[in-house]
Amino acid sequence: MTAPIAVKICGLRDRAGIDAAARAGARYVGFVFFPKSPRHLTLEAAAPLAGEVPVGVAKVALTVNADDAFLDALTARVPLDMLQLHGAESPERVAEVKARYGLPVMKAVGVGEASDLAALDLYTGVADQLLVDAKPPRGVDLPGGNGLAFDWRLLAGVTWKSPWMLAGGLTPDNAREAVARTGTRQLDVSSGVESAPGVKDADLIDRFVAAALTAD
Ligand SMILES: O=C(O)c1ccccc1N[C@@H]1O[C@H](COP(=O)(O)O)[C@@H](O)[C@H]1O
């Protein structure tokens, strides 16, 4: 049986964004803990926000090469359902984080060309989920959240044993095409549902989720 399509809205920073994502039918909401990002949240800001997320919507914390001290503080203060590791974390580090915090881990891998896909195999069976994102262009500081897509044709005929999400440059206008071209059952979006960097737009969130959920 084909899994139903699930949507993650990442980079939420306020109650209005959480409400919009939950109302639209998102399955996951993401909070970014990376100071260089326009979507960065402090632990102090994130804790009450995470507490507002309705039951049934998974709260995902995105970190980039975070050390144990930060993850200890994050997991102690913010109620979470999943950790998203979006840096250069090795498979060993993913396994360590999973064991230490007892939370499911999603590992992001940047894809720009066919040879990048091999890295995803290293995390299959180690991470609970894979996140197949666009590789950032050279010189760009953010490892994700750049609103750029990769060539989805690279995924033709590719499958992984672990559940996976597609990310990178998704928008309300290309969500259906992304599902059709890649066969993904999970979509992760940030920039494509914003009116400005870090500012989520309820109408775009609505349109994105509606497009994704009716993509079949
Ligand atoms: O959103 C960010 O600011 C961010 C910062 C650091 C790492 C990842 C980040 N976002 C993730 O990137 C992808 C794609 O985002 P976009 O839709 O292309 O803007 C997504 O997984 C976000 O969770």
Image (tube, rainbow, N blue to C red):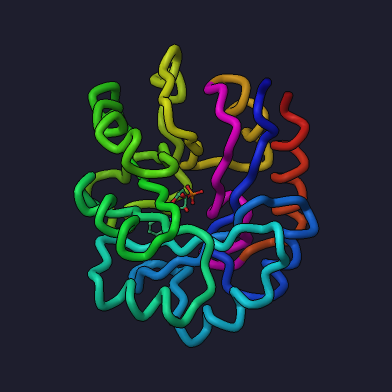
The structure residue drawn at horizontal position 63% and vertical position 61%, both measured from the top left corner, is 195
The structure residue drawn at horizontal position 33% and vertical position 72%, both measured from the top left corner, is 71
As for residue 196 lying within the magenta part, the answer is: yes
Q: Quadrant of residue 183?
A: top right
Seen in the picture, residue 109 relative to 141 is either above or below; the reply is above
Quick check: 52 left or right of 66? right
Q: Quadrant of the N terminus?
A: top right
Q: Quadrant of residue 62?
A: bottom left
Which region is colored magenta?
Answer: 182-199
**Which residue in the rendered view is the most extreme toward the bottom?**
44
Q: Nearer the viewer, residue 115 or 129?
A: 129
Seen in the picture, residue 54 relative to 2 is either above or below; the reply is below
As for residue 51 lying within the magenta part, the answer is: no
The structure residue drawn at horizontal position 77% and vertical position 32%, both measured from the top left corner, is 214
Q: Position of residue 86 (x, y in %)?
A: 34, 53
Q: Position of residue 84 (x, y in %)?
A: 41, 55
Quick check: 36 left or right of 145? left
Q: Position of residue 129 (x, y in %)?
A: 44, 42
The structure residue drawn at horizontal position 25% and vertical position 34%, both measured from the top left corner, is 122
Quick check: 41 left or right of 173? left
Seen in the picture, residue 26 relative to 4 is either above or below; the reply is below
Q: Position of residue 30 (x, y in %)?
A: 53, 60
